[in-house]
Image (cartoon, rainbow, N blue to C red):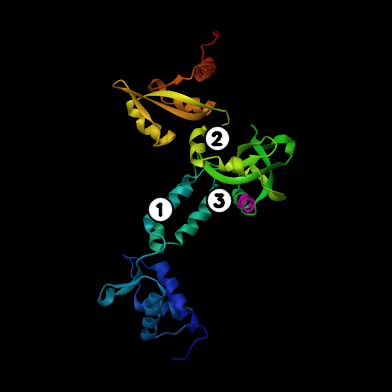
Amino acid sequence: MARSAYQKLKPLYIMNYLLQNSDEDHLVSMSQLIEHLAAHGIPSERKSVYDDIEALRVFGLDIVQGGSGKNAGYYIANRSFELPELKLLVDSVQSSKFITHKKTATLIKKIETLASIHEAQLLNRQVYVKNRIKTMNESIYYNIDAIQSGISQNKKIQFKYFEYTVQKTRHYRKDGAFYVVSPFAMTWDDENYYLVAFDSQARIIKHYRVDKMTEISSSEEDRDGLDAYQALDMAVYARKVFGMFSGEEESVQLRFENHLVGAVLDRLGQEVFIIADGDDHFTVRADVVVSPQFFAWVTGFGAAAQIIGPNDVVEKMRQHINSVAALYSPAGQA
């Protein structure tokens, strides 16, 4: 049989076809492989295909032969990602509010290529993103890349920071002037991506929503504030700051009904010290950043949760509740 100019590519075509078309429930026959090669201008004989399959096995591709007679064929057994892992990735992308609809669809399409075309259909059935709340900032991927560049190069970054108006237009803070900070990490909180950085002027660690940053670039200045960042435990920081709202950090004592222990551990961490308070309640003490978001978390449990100390935080909670209640007072009453 005359050799094709593409004979050296034959093993690659076989590998690609098996990766795309085979799994444990869908075997690829020798005839299918030969037909696929012929379609790409590579005439082949069974023996040469057997040899190529064996070479791919030696290379590390887990090609398994299964079935018998007319149903005999080959499939890829172990892949870099198993189907349940790919489903987990798809679910994570779908539920990420900071990834836009367009980027969500693009990412899922790429994830599908890691499975066979048959398993990809199972992933495709999970795509329910049309009506999910997503960020409106399409450039978030480029933002992340620019931030990581600053971190890896040990340089400060500059960017503009905006918020949305009631007309859904961007309003830039500081009258459109650039922020200049030392980037150190990114964290995910309440379905949003945040940059954690050191503000040289304020001499404190601050955080910024990545999808509200634009025109990011590295500066020529080296980062500062490393000591402040190293003193920061990111896991503890994320627990203390509710919804990434700033405020004063205080040691707060709270009282909950027993059925809320799971919710408390999820939010405050497994290491929080729980003290029984009678048969139906328990108390905990935690360092938190006191903010409206913290109060909202507590009031979300209704009468089953209560701040019991210190007195200044209890008073702030009372004022918070009264200000909210005033919005719902009957007409004509203060």
Assess disc 1: are there few (<14), some (14-19) or many (≥20) residues with their C-alpha within 10 Å of its C-alpha: many
* Picture disc at residue 244: 2
300 lies left or right of 228 = left
For residue 214, say whether it is visible. yes
48 lies left or right of 178 = left
Q: Earlier in the sequence, mark 1 or mark 3?
A: 1
For residue 135, say whether it is visible. no
- Residues under labels 2 and 3: Cα distance? 26 Å
- Report the mark closest to the observer, 2 or 3: 2
The local secondary structure at tag 3 comes to: helix
The residue drawn where x is 48% and y is 35% is 239
Instruction: Name which residue type carries label 3.
Output: Lys
Task: Please state the horizontal and vertical placement of residue 48, each as a whole percent of the image.
Answer: 39, 85
Task: Please state the horizontal and vertical placement of residue 145, each as a whole percent of the image.
Answer: 61, 53
- Residues under labels 1 and 3: Cα distance? 19 Å
Q: Quadrant of the C terminus?
A: top right
- Residues under labels 1 and 2: Cα distance? 29 Å
Assess disc 2: are there few (<14), some (14-19) or many (≥20) residues with their C-alpha within 10 Å of its C-alpha: many
Q: Earlier in the sequence, mark 2 or mark 3?
A: 3
Instruction: Name which residue type carries label 1.
Output: Lys
Magenta region, residue range: 146-151
The local secondary structure at tag 1 comes to: helix
Q: Which residue is mark 1?
A: 87
Instruction: Name which residue type carries label 2.
Output: Met
Assess disc 3: are there few (<14), some (14-19) or many (≥20) residues with their C-alpha within 10 Å of its C-alpha: few
Of the pair 222 and 176, the residue shown nearer to us: 222
Q: Which residue is mark 3?
A: 102
